């Protein structure tokens, strides 16, 4: 690919967005905000989203589906695939074949066979491909890896990692929302936590050899429905006392000025619009009266090829916080919470606290700057024709996804699975 220069600056990388939902909108916004990307096409079947996206970015080409985009030939350097999880594989394979570089929202696909099709298509086409594992691109992750590389805690022996999903986030996305059913999207470990298993492999610097897993759907079930609960929160006699009240969650977004998750429920920021959406839409249903089946808690035990061991816990029953990690080495330990790193040196007994948000980057943005870091790195890689500017490729993401599927086999069969 060739890029002409003007005044020493490359022309912006051109972008076609497939799927103008929340993630597609965010990647498009960030790409144009950097000044190194320009949206020239969008494919989105939902009229409201398509119209809003076109008004925001003014792409030259607007399509109702990805097939029409593909039929038009190669219109851009990059295709951002941000459709629902089960709709990734066909546009990804087809557009890679047309020569588009691919930025693919996680997870790659619901099954290993489909994910491998995408990785193979990218390899055969000779294009740059990356999955949106945004946790790799935070200042926190860079600082943590630098501490390990410098030997600050000696040799790494074991890791504890917690993903605190948050009680209301579980209710919004994984009980009432689009990721509530494995058949429609995938298992919780894939749709939510493939980030974490990819991140653990990146931080540990090793490949998992074996995995065991336990967990299930403990709480969001009909038998836990309180006496007197209604089918919808807007007409429920016990709504005020329920921690999962949709009325409380989404009206609080109005009071706090928060866009997400309210923008998944209604585009109109009024109490009347919120209550109307809760009366008729999926986000107003009682959490004990939905058709959800994904787990609300899960634990993994992992052994890596270097001998390092790790545990990973995903649970709904927390505040919505940053991920929390403890790393144990031969000469020290590190406690991290996504921002602060507390390093204890066993030789001196001293503890040092490092605020990684003070080290530059985009710490206040989405995923603590990971969204911006990913987009900047991907556009730079495409502009330079250098995939080495990215921390992972499709093959790396496929390898970390395989750990997810192995863990699910371990959970459902009660066995230890060797990769």
Image (spheres, rainbow, N blue to C red):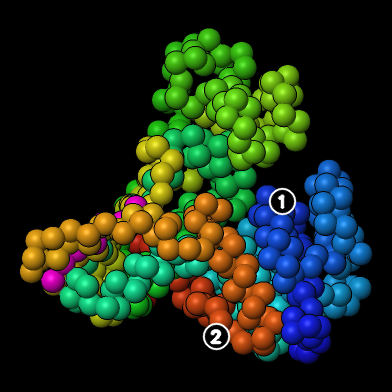
Dot 1 crowding, Cα within 10 Å, few <14, some 14–19, many 20+? some
Report the magenta stretch's main SS.
strand
- The quarter of the picture where the C terminus appears is bottom left
Q: Mark 1 or 2 closer to N-term?
A: 1
Q: Which residue is drawn at the image coordinates 73% and 67% (left, top)?
A: 35
User: Which quadrant of the view contains residue 379?
Assistant: bottom right
Q: Which residue is drawn at the image coordinates 40% and 33% (left, top)?
A: 219
Residue 18 pos. (x, y %): 76, 62
Residue 50 pos. (x, y %): 84, 51
Q: CA distance from mark 1 to mark 2?
A: 29 Å
Residue 85 pos. (x, y %): 63, 58
- The quarter of the picture where the N terminus appears is bottom right
User: Which quadrant of the view contains residue 118?
Assistant: bottom right
Q: Please identify the residue farthest to the front as the structure is shown.
A: 7
Q: How many marks?
A: 2
Between 365 and 52, the residue placed more toward the observer is: 365
Q: Secondary structure at mark 2?
A: helix
Q: Which disc, if any, is residue 21?
A: 1
Q: Which disc, if any, is residue 68?
A: none
Q: Is residue 241 left or right of residue 47?
A: left
Residue 370 pos. (x, y %): 53, 61
Q: Which residue is drawn at the image coordinates 73% and 19% (left, top)?
A: 272
Q: Which disc, if any, is residue 388?
A: 2
The question of residue 6 being in magenta is answered with no
Q: Is residue 352 left or right of residue 201?
A: left
Q: Is residue 411 visible?
A: no
Which span of residues is magenta-colored? Answer: 331-338
Q: Secondary structure at mark 1?
A: loop
Between 346 and 213, the residue placed more toward the observer is: 346
């Amino acid at each position: 690919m060739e890029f002409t220069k003007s005044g020493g600056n490359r022309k912006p990388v051109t972008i076609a967005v497939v799927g103008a939902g929340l993630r597609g909108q965010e990647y498009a916004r960030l790409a144009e905000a950097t000044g190194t990307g320009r949206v020239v096409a969008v494919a989105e079947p939902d009229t409201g989203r398509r119209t809003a996206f076109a008004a925001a970015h003014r792409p030259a080409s607007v399509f109702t589906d990805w097939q029409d985009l593909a039929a038009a030939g190669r219109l851009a350097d990059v295709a951002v695939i941000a459709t629902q999880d089960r709709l990734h594989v066909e546009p990804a394979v087809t557009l890679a074949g047309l020569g588009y570089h691919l930025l693919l929202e996680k997870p790659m696909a619901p099954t290993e066979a489909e994910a491998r099709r995408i990785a193979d298509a990218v390899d055969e086409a000779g294009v740059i491909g990356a999955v949106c594992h945004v946790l790799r691109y935070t200042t926190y992750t860079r600082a943590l890896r630098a501490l390990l590389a410098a030997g600050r805690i000696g040799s790494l022996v074991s890791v504890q990692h917690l993903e605190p999903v948050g009680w209301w986030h579980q209710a919004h996305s994984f009980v009432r929302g689009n990721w509530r059913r494995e058949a429609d999207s995938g298992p919780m470990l894939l749709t939510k936590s493939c980030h974490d298993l990819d991140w653990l492999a990146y931080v540990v610097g090793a490949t998992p050899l074996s995995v065991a897993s336990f967990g299930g759907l403990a709480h969001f079930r009909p038998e836990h429905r309180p006496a007197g609960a209604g089918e919808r929160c807007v007409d429920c006699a016990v709504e005020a006392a329920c921690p999962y009240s949709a009325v409380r969650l989404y009206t609080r977004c109005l009071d706090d000025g928060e866009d997400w998750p309210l923008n998944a429920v209604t585009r109109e920021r009024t109490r009347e619009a919120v209550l109307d959406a809760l009366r008729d839409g999926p986000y107003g249903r009682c959490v004990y009266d939905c058709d959800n089946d994904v787990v609300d808690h899960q634990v993994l035990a992992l052994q890596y090829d270097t001998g390092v061991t790790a545990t990973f816990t995903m649970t709904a029953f927390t505040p919505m916080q940053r991920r929390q990690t403890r790393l144990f080495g031969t000469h020290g330990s590190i406690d991290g919470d996504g921002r602060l790193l507390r390093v204890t040196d066993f030789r001196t007994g001293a503890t040092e606290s490092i605020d990684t948000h003070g080290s530059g980057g985009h710490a206040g943005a989405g995923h603590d700057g990971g969204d911006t870091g990913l987009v900047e790195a991907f556009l730079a890689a495409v502009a330079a024709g250098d995939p080495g500017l990215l921390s992972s490729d499709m093959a790396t993401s496929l390898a970390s996804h395989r750990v997810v599927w192995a863990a699910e086999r371990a959970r459902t069969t009660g066995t230890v699975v060797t990769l």
